[in-house]
């Protein structure tokens, strides 16, 4: 049977990883010359949070622990959305005849 006390700790870690991913994405977005508090800014924060949580789960699968898990979440939020966004734009641009 699953221990409820352990589940609470794991959920707390996942939420912290998501928050770190969101903060990483917001830090990256803030470093550009774009205006803040727009829909794009909120989209970056949500995407960074989900990428941070996903990276945290993958880190657990590779048996990382401690600060490494949270470093992976931060990096996924900071770098992951930019890479996915650029890749998606290239694919869509080719498909619909853009540049």
Image (tube, rainbow, N blue to C red):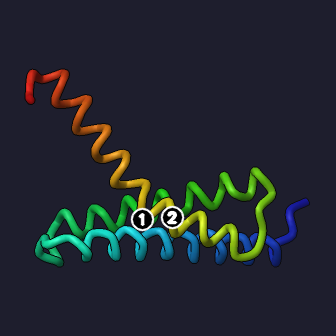
- 37 is higher (above) or lower (below) than 82: below
Q: Quadrant of the N terminus?
A: bottom right
The residue most toward the left is: 98
13 and 89: which is toward the camera? 89
Label 1 Cα crowd, 10 Å radius (few <14 / some 14-19 / many 20+): many
Q: Position of residue 20 (x, y in %)?
A: 50, 75
Q: Quadrant of the C terminus?
A: top left
Q: Position of residue 13 (x, y in %)?
A: 66, 74
* Disc on res. 78: 1
* Disc on res. 75: 2
> What is the secondary structure assignment of the residue under circle 2?
helix
The answer to whether mark 2 and mark 1 are in CB contact below 8 A is yes
Q: Give the residue drawn at x 44%, y 63%.
A: 77
> What is the secondary structure assignment of the residue under circle 1?
helix
52 and 94: which is toward the camera? 94
Examine the image and state in which quarter residue 70 appears. Answer: bottom right
Examine the image and state in which quarter residue 94 appears. Answer: top left
């Amino acid at each position: 049977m699953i221990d409820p006390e352990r589940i609470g700790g794991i959920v707390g870690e996942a939420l912290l990883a998501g928050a770190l991913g969101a903060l990483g994405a917001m830090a990256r977005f803030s470093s550009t010359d774009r205006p803040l508090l727009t829909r794009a800014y909120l989209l970056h924060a949500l995407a960074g949070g989900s990428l941070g949580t996903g990276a945290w789960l993958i880190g657990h699968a590779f048996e990382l622990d401690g600060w490494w898990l949270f470093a992976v979440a931060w990096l996924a939020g900071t770098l992951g959305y930019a890479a996915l966004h650029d890749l998606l734009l290239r694919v869509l641009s080719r498909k619909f005849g853009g540049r």
